Image (spheres, coloured by chain):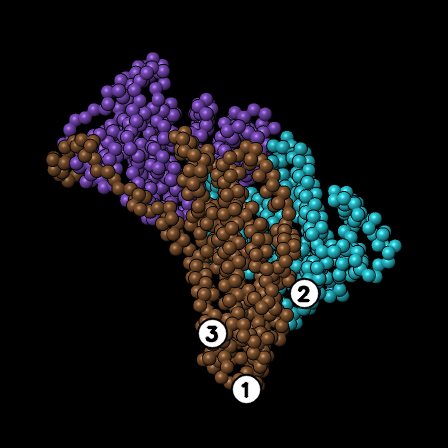
Chain colours: A purple, B cyan, C brown
Amino acid sequence: MEQKPILEVKNLQISFQLNFGTNHVIRDISFHLNKGETLAIVGESGSGKSVTTKAILGLIDDNGCVEVGSCLFRYQKDNKDVEIDLLKCGKDYLQKNIRGNKIAIIFQDPMTSLDPTMKVGRQIMEGMLDHKKVSNRKAAVKRTLELLELVGIDLPEKRINQYPHQLSGGMRQRVVIAIALACEPDVLIADEPTTALDVTIQSQILELIKDIQKKTGVAIIFITHDLGVVANVADRVAVMYAGKIVETGLANEIYYSPKHPYTWGLLSSIPSMSGQNEEILSIPGTPPNLINPPKGDAFAYRSEYAMDIDFEEHPPMFQVSDTHFVASWLLHPDAPKVSMPTVLQARIESYKKRGDQQ
Amino acid sequence: MLKYISKRIFWSIITLLIIVFILFLLLQFMPGTPFDDEKLTEAQRIIMYAKYGLDSPFWQRFGIYLKNILLEGDFGISLALQKNQLVQDIVLPRLGISIRIGLQALLLGTTMGVIYGVISGANKNKWIDTITTFVAVLGVSVPSYVFALLLSYFFGYKWRIFSITYRHGAPFWSSILPTISLSMFVMAQTTRFLRTELIEVLSSEYIKLVEAKGVKRIKVIFRHGIRNALISVVTILGPLTVTLMTGSLVVERVYGVPGIGDLLVEGILTNDFNVIVMIAFIYSSLYITMNLAVDILYGIIDPRIRVAKGG
Amino acid sequence: MEKINKEMFTRISTQDHQVQEMVFDTGATFFKDAWKRFRKNKGGVIGLFAIIFILTMAIIGPWLGTHVYNELIAEHIDLPARVPFLEYFGIFDGSVNGFNPYIKKGLTDVYYWFGTDNLGRDLWSRVWMGTRISFFVAFVAVTIDVVFGITYGLISGYFGGKVDLVMQRIVEVISGIPNLVVVILLVLVLKPGLTSIILALMITGWISMSRVVRSQTLKIKEMEFVLAAKSLGASSFVIIAKEVLPNIIGQIIVMTMFSIPSAIFYESFLAFIGLGLQPPVASLGVLISRGYLAMLTYPHMVTFPVVVLSTLMLSFNLVADGLRDAFDPKMKGF
């Protein structure tokens, strides 16, 4: 049965007013999130991925402004299907019905995302009490203990009365996840949830998120700069560059047959997991400054596959398959045939082999 | 926590001893001995010399001085204001009223300051913030004696709402104008400090997360914002105490409040060194105690310090 | 899709890539940037203009008036302010409490813009001369305490270890004594006068400056560019002058701007409690402490110096606030 996506972002444009000009952070992006799936949004820092998700919850800073676009969200309210535009419904509506309640968020740095002067138990309970998910304090405590258990914190009775600084980084991130899950949201936005953590803790948290999705069926938007991190988690991937989505598709399509040179770059720069001495390629240069966005394809300035047309006009989305779209002139029928770097090709072959073995 | 407190107490005592030594040194430079008064008989003079050890060597004299101060609160006799009276008998009766007005001003100032600071910080860059910010910068800029002069001119003289000078018959009513004059700076400074703190707290990541939980803005500000911002406001209590002392010298003079601030000015005008020294000692002890109290209080209200050190 | 010329699809080599112009690099240096932000701060700009105005008046004001500074005219005592032209509007017409001493004394052609004091001296020239002295005291005291505070903070922070420990203990003890006590005792011992006031202000002013400089130095000296300079064999002096100082200059300027009004305040405060400059020298503090005695009968004697003093302090604070926001929007404190 064809189901409508739970979240649908269309033609979103966001800019920030700065002292020395207007920063066009998001330049016309569209994507959707289906029920129960995990969508990974991948890109370098500054590509606009965090801003997008903050905009969905109306959390962008005062100098930020949504210029154009809509963000349709479909959920059940009093057993009725509701469809609203999150960008137009107003902060009060967001606060009462959406934030925490239907869409929850996990921030990057667990060291700074908890109130240092409040016990973690109270911070978890806060959302459910405010949204009246539980009838009284006692029920809230009970639910909090369950949540702490769910996110894998041992000794929940003790932890519930501790302050954030008494917990390790990994534990704090588990608390943040517990806070997000407190009201059983439909959508969970994980904004680089593992970036600030040690590698071993990273994989634990990733496992936890996967596990939670299995148990609760929550749809997840997973934001990261590292394609390697989401390889095992994502159902679909959207690659962002300079405020635009440059390639989007199913995880398999992105990992096994990427089409955009930027995606090639991202995939090549993942450190090898096989332990062999593979060549790691990095993408030269830095992302462009978006106060005066470059004409044409922003990535052309860093791409060795650039063509004249790239500096004139931004490429449209070329459709590769039902689910795979790429914004690159290289897919134009008139463009010269280029293929991905051989190093990457070799790497993908080895991934495939390993995938087959599993 | 205990170790930390005892360390702070130790350094406070050292500081106080150094202050006493400086005060003592100062007296050595002052002209004449305090007992040159003709009215004293030879017998009285000998008793005095023995009591204050004026014939002994320097360090012994300091020892006696220290002992007199710490054990008996004896700073010698008044040289000019009320000749040959013990300084403590002149100063101590006046201490209460100064402390009372100081505390009133502190209470009024910090309360108003917290209210304005919250209003201002929570409405950053809106018109109400512009107004409070301007009032606050006015409050830290205009000296307290100017407020004292203004208030006494209008409320005391022109409109006759309050008494123009302090009266014993109406200790609270007539202390209102001095209290307000003194509290202006406290209010302004608290407002400015709390505003900066609150803005910083409200722009922090954890406040974003609380907002993402769907908590009402007003609850975000009260439950998380003010709580965190207020903790650091405690640290300005020390400096504010000094401002209050400084202000009290002039404000007490303008309103004729019989406190130690006014007495200190009298002492300065008449070169009554022992009076000056005793009040300087009281001010220093008050300041040191206040700083100590602030440090301990800070440790108690901030869980990061409390739990870490008491753990 | 519209037809695109096939020519456009030629690959170009990496070397030919246009380099995108970075907006940040177009000459927006640290100070220019700060100045840009400062200009947007209305309070700061108004404050700056007020300071420039008062400073100009302090320099040329005494000569603009119609009367000579410090001249005693017995018949002209206690005259309120009277300004030509403005007097027709009922303000500055020389009357006080419904009574006009100018007319009473037959001085119909005499105008004192700020009135006179109880010795018949012209307050206009005295106020501006007083402003001059207040400026002088504040600038000298602040300059010395900035230099001393910076030196102390730099040495303590840069050399660290035992030096730092001893120096910080000293600071701790000194800051344990209230300023008020230090200033009063010092002026008392040295006898009131310009030098002793400046000295007293200096002694209390440098501590906060040294603290800021020390903590910044501690932070900066661990940064990579300083370590790099060190490993290249740069001497301590060169590192401090070239690497550390330029990085804290913004904070130093802001701190300086905040300590000027406090120095101006202390000067007037000392005058008020009898430890300031002694008449006939006029500083704003001296004028206020004299004027306040006659406040109820001749409010003009205290009004003008108080207005100038308050405006001056307000302006400095506004400018300091503006600069703080301009240099570092996140810089805390006051």
**Mark 3 vs mark 2: in front:** 3
Residues indicated by labels 1 and 3 sit on the same polypeptide chain: yes
CA gap between label 1 and label 3 equals: 21 Å
Please, what secondary structure does the residue beneath circle 3 have?
loop
Say above or below: A90 vs C295: above
Q: Earlier in the sequence, mark 1 or mark 3?
A: 3
Residue tagged 1: C106
Q: Tell me where residue B35 appears, x and y as whole percent.
A: 79, 56
Task: Give the distance between the C-alpha atoms of the residues marked 2 and 1, in whole angstroms.
Answer: 37 Å
Asked if residue A11 is positioned above or below residue A33 in the image, the reply reads below
Q: What residue type is labelled 2?
A: Tyr
Does residue B147 show up? Answer: no
Which is more toward the observer, B8 or C266? C266
**Residue at 68% across, 36% down:** B6
- Observer-nearest residue: C19 or C199? C199
Q: Which residue lies furthest to the right in this view?
A: B43
Other-residue count near label 2 (Cα within 10 Å), few / some / many at <14 / 14–19 / ≥20: many
Kind of residue indicated by mark 3: Gly
Position of A63 with respect to B144 (left or right) is: left
Q: Residues within 10 Å of mark 1 (few under 14, many from 20)?
A: few
Q: Nearer the viewer, mark 2 or mark 1?
A: 1
Q: How far apart are marks 3 and 2 (CA)?
A: 35 Å
Write down the quadrant of residue A222 in the picture.
Answer: top left
Residue highlighted by disc 3: C65
Q: What element carries label 1?
A: loop
Mark 1 residue type: Gly
Residue A340: mark: none
Which chain letter goes with mark 1? C
Marked residue chain, label 3: C
Pinpoint residue A90: horizontal percent, then vertical percent.
Answer: 42, 48
From the viewer's perspective, is B300 left or right of B84?
Answer: left
